[in-house]
Structures are given as C-alpha cells and as structure tokens.
Amino acid sequence: MPSTTLSPPTSVLPWLTTAGRLLLGAVWLVAGAAKITDLDASVRAVRAYRLLPETAAQVVGAGLPLVELLLGVLLVAGAGCGPPRRSRPC
C-alpha cells in the first residue's frame, strides 16, 4: 500500500513559515512590551515560581522583558534567514 502524506504545496510552505515567524515575533514583542512597563510585576512573577534564589529572580525578572523584545525584533526582522531571495521568503 503506498504511503500518502498530506503536505502543502512547496510554493506555499515558505509563506507559511514566514507568517509563523512574524506571528511569533509579534507575540514576543507584545509580551515584552507588557512586562517592560511594570518591571516589579515581572520580578514578582519570576519570584513566584520559587525556582531561583532571590538575587537571580530579580535579575531574570528585570531582564526577561528585554530578552523578549529582542527576540521579537529579531524574528520580525528575519535575522538568521540569510540574504533575501525572490524565489523564497524567509
């Protein structure tokens, strides 16, 4: 019996991955922007997990919004996708 797999046409797949990358980047940007306006709440949220010592929880809680914003910018900008090509979006 031949194996059949359902997959999108090869011309659509690059556009789907680009849309996914942009959507994920937008999620990171919104999450980082929401947390950066209230760093105390971000620190409290990290502290509430009780996984890190107090000093580390403060550093992670304050740094997490910046990391999220950076990841969002890099994803939306397409960093790591290589040079732009007409034949295929990133």
Image (spheres, rainbow, N blue to C red):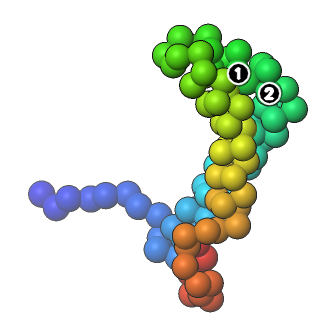
**How many residues crowd mark 2 within 10 Å: few (<14), some (14–19), many (20+)?**
some
Q: Residues within 10 Å of mark 1 (few under 14, many from 20)?
A: many
Cα–Cα span, label 1 and label 2:
6 Å
Residue sitting farthest toward the front: 55
The residue carrying mark 2 is 39
Q: Looking at the picture, tell me which residue is in the foreground, 49 or 85.
A: 49
Above or below 74: residue 68: above
Q: Residue furthest right?
A: 37
Toward the left, the furthest residue is 1
Q: Is residue 82 above or below residue 73?
A: below
Residue at 58% x, 84% y is 83
Along the line of sight, the residue nearer the viewer: 73 or 22: 73
Q: In this view, does 79 lie above or below 26?
A: below
Q: Position of residue 51 (x, y in %)?
A: 49, 16
What secondary structure is marked by label 2? helix
The reply to whether residue 27 is in sight is no
Q: Residue at horizontal 46%, vertical 74%?
A: 10
Direction from residue 88 to residue 64 in the image, left or right? right
Provide residue 36's location: percent of width, then percent of height.
81, 35
Q: Which residue is drawn at 67% across and 43% down?
A: 68
Location of residue 86 in the rendering, given as x and y in whole percent from the top left corner: 62, 88
Q: Which residue is drawn at 64% across and 30% down?
A: 59
Asked if labels 2 and 1 touch by Cβ distance under 8 angstroms, the answer is yes
- Residue type at mark 2: give it: Leu
Quadrant of res 38: top right
Q: Name the residue under label 1.
A: 43
Viewer-closest of 36 and 82 = 36
Q: Position of residue 39 (x, y in %)?
A: 80, 27
**Residue 25 numbered mark, or none:** none
Q: Which amino acid does label 1 sit on?
A: Val
Mark 1 falls on what kind of element? helix
User: Which image quadrant: the N terminus?
Assistant: bottom left
